[in-house]
Structures are given as structure tokens and as C-alpha cells.
Image: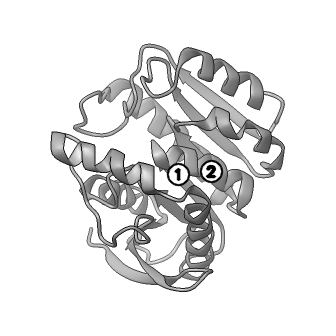
Amino acid sequence: MSGQKITIQAKDGGSFGAYVAKPASGSGPAIVVIQEIFGVNPWIRAVADQYAAQGFVAVAPDLFWRIRPGIELNDRDPDELQQAFGLFGEFDVAKGVEDIQATIDAARKLSTGKVGAVGFCLGGMLAYLTAARTNSDATASYYGVALDNFLGEAASIKTPTILHIAGEDKFVSKEAQERINSGLKGNPLVTLYNYPGMEHAFARTNGEHYSEKEAKLADKRTLDFFNTNLK
């Protein structure tokens, strides 16, 4: 499956690129695929391709464009890993969510109307904020970092949302996981899935901590969730 690149206008001026993968039918509901700290790299494009194969229009925006457009990094390269952490430090989260809303708006025009979002790592945090701050119709977060800093926004989540939490995530302490679980259980639209023993990025294919069994479980839950809420 071959994707294409489109340009999206930012709300505050400027524009950024996004990778788009369409299903064989050419149309369907859309899913915004939110990048990790490594940019829209081959793995993120592969995730978009997988959703397209399942009947969705998948759109992966370049959220690092305000720092430098077109960043693609390899999580297995130590130098590039350090570069990615540096980019994370420079990244403006609020502007990133605004760019996701702009992507959702663009995706509605490319699709049958309903638009969801899925994000990983940094994207997992952004997915949570997407659920709270945008008009996404359904949102999935994989091992989002720093979610406990934004629990005050839980009541703003008005559409179905799922979170996958890695039990041994070195970037999310056990205490933080407890706060996330307790802080979100009061919102009936939010479903949390905990994966005991799993490390951060357990669903990143070919990643250092990839777990095929748990990744397939999380991915099936997510696909079922999108099929229920977007189709």
C-alpha cells in the first residue's frame, strides 16, 4: 500500500506535512496517527498503512515541523535516541494539540466524516489531550507519558477514549500509574487497560521492548474500539 503526502494549514499560520494512507475503497472514517518522539518515521507510516488496510483513512501529521520539518529518527540508534529526547524537550505540547485539531479538520474532508486518533509515547500523551481538547470522535492512547500532569482535564473528555498503560514503564512510575487509573475511573467514557510486566513501547514492532502477544492484544482492542465508534 502506497501513501501520499498532503499539506495542512496550521491555525496560527504556516503549514505542515502529513502522511496519508487510504483504504482500497478510497474512503472510510479517518484516524489521525500521532507520532512518537521519533517523528513520522517508517514505523508510524506502517501503523497508518495498517489502519488503511482495515478500512480507515489514516493521517500521520508531522508535529515536529515547528522545530524542523521532516524529522525521522531510529529508536535503536543511540545518537538518534538522544536527539529524540532533545526534541521532546523543545516540543510545544499546546501547539501540538492545535496541530492535531487542524489535522482532524483536514481528515474530515478526506473521509466519510468521523475521525478518531491514536498516539504512542509522546503521542500517547497528545492522544489523551486530543480527547480532552479537540473534537475527535474516539481516541486511543498507548503508554502516554506525563498523563498524571493533566488529570485535571479528565472531565473534558466527552467522547469514547481508551488508554493502554504499561506496568513496567520506566517513564511512568507506579505511583503515576495509580494516579492515572484513579483519576480517570470517574469518567464513564474512558476505559483503561493495564499491561502488567510490560515496558514502555511494548507495541512498537521491532522495538527494544516489543511484546508480540501484548501488542496484538492492545492493537485488537484498539481496532475493535475504532470499528465500534467510527464505522
Q: Is residue 101 above or below residue 218?
A: below
Front-most of residues 5 and 85: 85
Q: Is residue 156 above or below residue 110?
A: above
Q: Are marks 2 and 1 in contact (CB under 8 Å)?
A: yes
- Disc sitting over residue 139 in the figure: 2
**Residue 32 image offset from top left, x and y in percent:** 52, 62
What is the quadrant of residue 146 in the picture?
A: top right
- Is 14 on the left or on the right of 177, as rendered? left
Q: Is residue 107 above or below residue 58?
A: below
Under mark 2, the amino acid is: Thr
**Which type of secondary structure does the marked residue at label 2 adopt?**
strand
- Disc sitting over residue 118 in the figure: 1
**Which type of secondary structure does the marked residue at label 1 adopt?**
strand
**Residue 119 image offset from top left, x and y in percent:** 50, 49
**Distance from the alpha carbon under mark 2 to that under mark 1:** 6 Å
Total marks in image: 2
Q: Residue at x 76, y 28 (%)?
A: 183
- Disc sitting over residue 144 in the figure: none
Residue 77 in sight in this render: no
- Is 111 on the left or on the right of 26, as rendered? right
Residue 50 in sight in this render: yes
- Is 176 on the left or on the right of 56, as rendered? right
Query: According to the image, what is the colour scheme of the structure?
Result: one colour
